[in-house]
Image: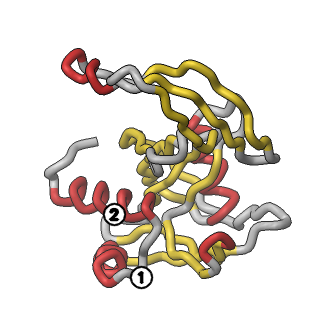
Amino acid sequence: MTRQQDSDIVETTLDSKSVYEGGFLKVRRDTVRLPNGRQSSREYIVHPGAVVVIAQPDDDHVIMVRQYRYPVQRVILEFPAGKLDAGEEPLTCGQRELLEETGYTAQDWISAGQMHLAVGYSDEVIHIYFARDLTAGKAQLDEDEFLNVEVMSVGSVLEACRTGAITDAKSLTCALWLQNVRSGKWGI
């Protein structure tokens, strides 16, 4: 969304080229006209989008997952999440991912909006959902997916954010949402 008063800082695409197309991500290099009339290039990752779920079995707990994330070579504590399949609606993705990763289903789904994860080099949008009135079941992990599910108190999650035990940007954002919704500062 560009506001009228921001029109003096908008870049205009002159040319766009595919640099790499993988099975999951694509890389593009665009030539742009800068606000001062000069040209520059922008390289960025095209991402299909994703969903993250703040699943609450009760007011004081959330469902978290521990998953090995290869790019950073470590196990990351995070809220359940996953990428959108082609043509998939975000709510459908959230419901699918929560069931696949944790075995939980939810009767109550509330959208908390969306976030851009890495605006400097990616167009990825992550849709945030609260899931409530949960029913436990058996996880349905993909054959190449390995993770551990953990029910954590909200206080423990917030403390993990403070101490650096949670470093995942989407999970830090979800913790902010959770904290403010619970305190009544933000409504959903």
- When asked about the image quadrant of residue 162, the answer is bottom left
Crowding at dot 1, Cα within 10 Å, few <14 / some 14-19 / many 20+, comes out as: some
Q: Are marks 1 and 2 in contact (CB under 8 Å)?
A: no
Q: Amino acid at mark 2?
A: Ala
The residue furthest right is 143
Q: Examine the rendered structure and indicate whether residue 166 appears above or below residue 138.
A: below
Quadrant holding the C terminus: top left
Q: Which residue: 16% across, 59% down?
A: 183
Q: Examine the rendered structure and indicate whether residue 70 appears above or below residue 20.
A: below
In this picture, residue 104 sits left or right of residue 138: left
Which disc is residue 89 wearing? none
Q: Specify whether residue 1 is in view.
A: no
Q: Which residue: 28% across, 60% down?
A: 176
Return the disc, 1 or 2, that comes first in the chain's sequence: 1
Q: Callout 2: helix, strand or loop?
A: helix
Q: Which residue: 64% across, 48% down?
A: 83
Q: Callout 1: helix, strand or loop?
A: loop
Crowding at dot 2, Cα within 10 Å, few <14 / some 14-19 / many 20+, comes out as: many
Where does the image place residue 158, in percent across and percent down from the top left? 30, 74
Mark in front: 1 vs 2 = 1
Which disc is residue 165 wearing? 1
In this picture, residue 23 sits left or right of residue 6: right
Where does the image place residue 86, in percent across and percent down from the top left? 73, 33
